[in-house]
Image (cartoon, grey):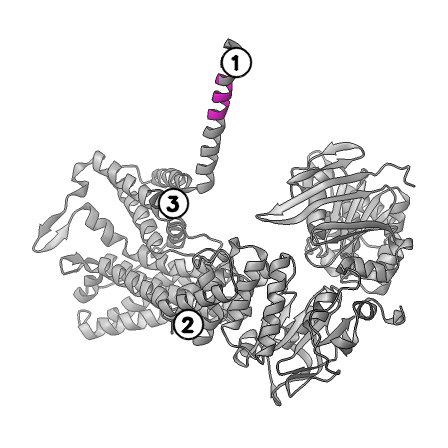
Amino acid sequence: MDEVRPLLELTGATVRFGADAALSRVDFRLFPGEVHSLMGENGAGKSTLIKAITGALRLDEGTLTLAGDRVEFADPHAAQRAGISTVYQEVELLPNMTVAENICLGREPRRGGVISTRLMNARAAALLADLGLEVDPASLLGGHSVAVQQLVAIARAISADLRVLVLDEPTSSLDLDEVAELFRIIRELKSRGVAILFVSHFLDQVYEICDRVTVLRDGALVGEYLTHELLRIDLVQKMLGRGVAEVRARGRAVDDAPAGEAVLRARGVSSARGIQDADLDLGEGEVLGVAGLLGSGRTSLARALTGVTRLESGVIRIEDADVHLDSPRRAMSLGVVYSSEDRRRDGIVAELSVLDNITLALQSEQGMLRQIPAARRRDLAASWVEALDIRPPDLDRPAGTLSGGNQQKVLLARLLALSPRVLVLDEPTRGIDVGAKVEIQNLVAELAENGMSVVFISAELEEVLRVGDRVAVVRDGRITDTVAAADLTADSLLALVAQPGEDEG
Amino acid sequence: MTAIYKHRLFWPLVSLLTLIVINFIARPQFLKITVRDGELYGPLISILRESAPLMLVALGMTIVIATRGIDLSVGAIMAVSGAVALTIIDGASDPSNMGTVTIAIVVAILVSLVLGVWNGFLVSVVGIQPIIATLVLMLAGRGVALLITGGFITTVNSDPFSFIASGYVIGLPFAFLIGVVAIVVLSIVERRTALGVLTEAVGINPEASRLAGVRSRGIIWGAYIMSGTLAGVAGLIYASNIKAADANAAGVFIELYAILAVVLGGTSLNGGKFSIAGTVIGVLIIQTLDSTILFLGVKSAQSPVFFAVVVVVVVIVQSARLRDGLAAMSGRLRARRESAQDRDKVEVA
């Protein structure tokens, strides 16, 4: 097998966004006729790597070779011409055009300079038949199910010279039968010698279809493995990154009920996306760690508790009063605040200053017409910058220019300025340097000692164990276990997170 | 020194001053201001007076654009506002009665405000894209105005009403003073309250703002109400100037000029950071350019082309990317020359 030369090879790939490296010195190879999975948590660098391969991003360092030749794609079109096609998670087709028009978009067959619908339908029909799909090429794309649209997108990506097909979470909106259909097509392409990069966070699917796995973590390569040689639990461990037998720094032993009175109680909480029938109690001054894989429902849980997404069913009580959290604003007024996992997308307001970012929530709570006096705003922001050691300590700098760790601190300062009772932190330490990570962990411990209740979500199991008094394990949209952190080791937690059937392992 | 050079209003100001200098060279009397009966006259004063409607509309547009929106309906709202006011004055027994004119003005502004409420409702509550939501009124508004005037151009002779556009207060045109009041009030409302910074937050990152508890719906809604109301006042000035309500001509294309003024003033169409001072400069650039075209005697058929050429030049001058590109290019050229010289030296050696 290894005698075969890789079709596509990435060597020493580095991509930087400002000061942060999204990908650092990663090697990656893809063989013809294999299905290769790229695994990793949020921020591991999966999408950056895909973009580097498909020409959407330039490499700052490193080389990309295709069939032995060094290549550099200026844009996705150049990559497509070289035989590298991508199908994204969200279908990027035009629902108001026919299936055939979508398939032939941009390369319509012409007769005498005029687009020939007849030729187009014939060509699309041939392509679809090739894939074993029974779809009328003249029908409107929007009339078909998402699954069929996804398959049409693949049909579109397939052309005579297709060499590499990148599927970025193609199954996230498909049901089981549809996934089977997709897999049949993947196998068909594989038998034709196409190299397929399959990204999915469903472990079952990875094990079913993939020959080889490359694991990334924090923008760096963890390793490349043959799927059948890699135990599922080992894969999860590699994704989450866990040193062997680390000593826990903090372990206040409590049993599986919260110490003291519950500040926040959730019963049967379900939201439209991701979390079902979740029960949760959060005691005063307690840190509840939440462990779960990407896509397990850990973020949906956090968002359901903080009014970011509406509940489909279930009740949330704060200090024994039923509350209706229909917006983040409402939750904030009740002292429940949420820090998003994606700082850039929905955390920081990048072009506003550190000062404005820190005072944003407090100001909007005060009402837009009663401006906090400038001097007080400045004092307040300066005190938070000092307390959290935000660097550089420049209040007027646009927050977007800070490093990840400092942006996270600005976000924390914004929420802490509200003096909340319940702080829900969704991966607050993702993608930030080790020093800032420890500072944030210590801060959480300090806040809890002062009576604040914290929900702390992290992909790193040690961190969850170190910070949390108890740990709730989220899997497949449900809270499957809630265990005192003292009763867990990193290994036993890993077993709970990885798979239901492997309790013993 | 470099601080001045980097200030966001530096290039807009340079553009405006350049236009004024060109005018001054072409006709030295351009800067001449005469005093007659304690009232100021002259080309510059005319520019200030005539800029009032565009100023009001562009100020509202600035806030709307800061929220990532756009308001295409301002011209139509101007037409409606003028039609409402003139119909009321025309229907009154004494068009010059101060009370009648006051009622007409108040009703016209209230109607404009309601139209702004409608736009804001479509955008912030129903969630229609701003360009489509305001297109509705842009197309329908003039029809409404025609309906109000019964399909005619209503003309009136009312001194109090004419005063809005042609009157003088403390030696300055009243219309100009309305613009100044709008600038001052808007600056105070945006910068002395938290509205400005919250508007920018919503424009830069709506989702982050929502998670931070910002009432983005109210802020966006308010921006359209503000825009509609200011357009209503602009419509009154326009109608007062021609002493008529011309539903087909009032505020035609003004939405586009207002957008241009906002952009010339350095506010990005992507929303977020906005500059009221920048918009004021942008409006003055457009108005000065307009007057230049008139003065230079460009044939009216060709004036849009001339206008467009100058605008393109101004936009290019203000483009940071182009300046950086030119700087980089000249740097490369210099480096190449120097390395060539180095080679020559080596060869000589």
Residue kind at label 2, given as amino acid type: Met
Q: Which mark is residue B6?
A: 3
- Mark 3 — on which chain does it sit? B
Q: Is residue A73 visible?
A: yes
The percent coordinates of residue B120 (x first, y second) are 46, 68
SS class, disc 2: loop
Quarter of the C terminus of chain A within the rendering = bottom right
**Mark 1 sits on what residue?**
B346
Query: Where is residue B317 shown, x and y percent of the image?
Result: 39, 39
Q: Quadrant of the N terminus of chain A?
A: top right
Q: Check the image and report above or below for B202 versus A10.
A: below
Image quarter of residue A378: bottom left
- Relative to residue A1, is residue B196 drawn left or right? left
x, y percent for residue B161 = 21, 65
Please name the residue shown 43% across and 41% down the image: B319
Q: Residue furthest bottom?
A: A320
- Residue B107 pos. (x, y %): 31, 73
Label 1 sits on what residue type?
Answer: Val
Q: CA distance from mark 3 to mark 1?
A: 40 Å
Q: Closer to us: mark 2 or mark 3?
A: 3
Q: Report the front residue among B312 and A37.
A: A37
Is the same chain shared between marks 3 and 1?
yes
User: Distance of mark 1 from mark 2, alpha carbons?
Assistant: 68 Å
Does residue B336 belong to the magenta stretch? Answer: yes
Number of the label disc, if any, that sits on residue A15 = none
In reply to whether residue B112 is colored magenta, the answer given is: no
**Which portion, as a residue range, is magenta?**
B334-341
In the depicted view, which residue is nearer to us: A226 or A305?
A226
For label 2, count other residues whose C-alpha is less than 10 Å away and answer few (under 14), some (14-19) or many (20+).
many
Disc on res. A368: 2
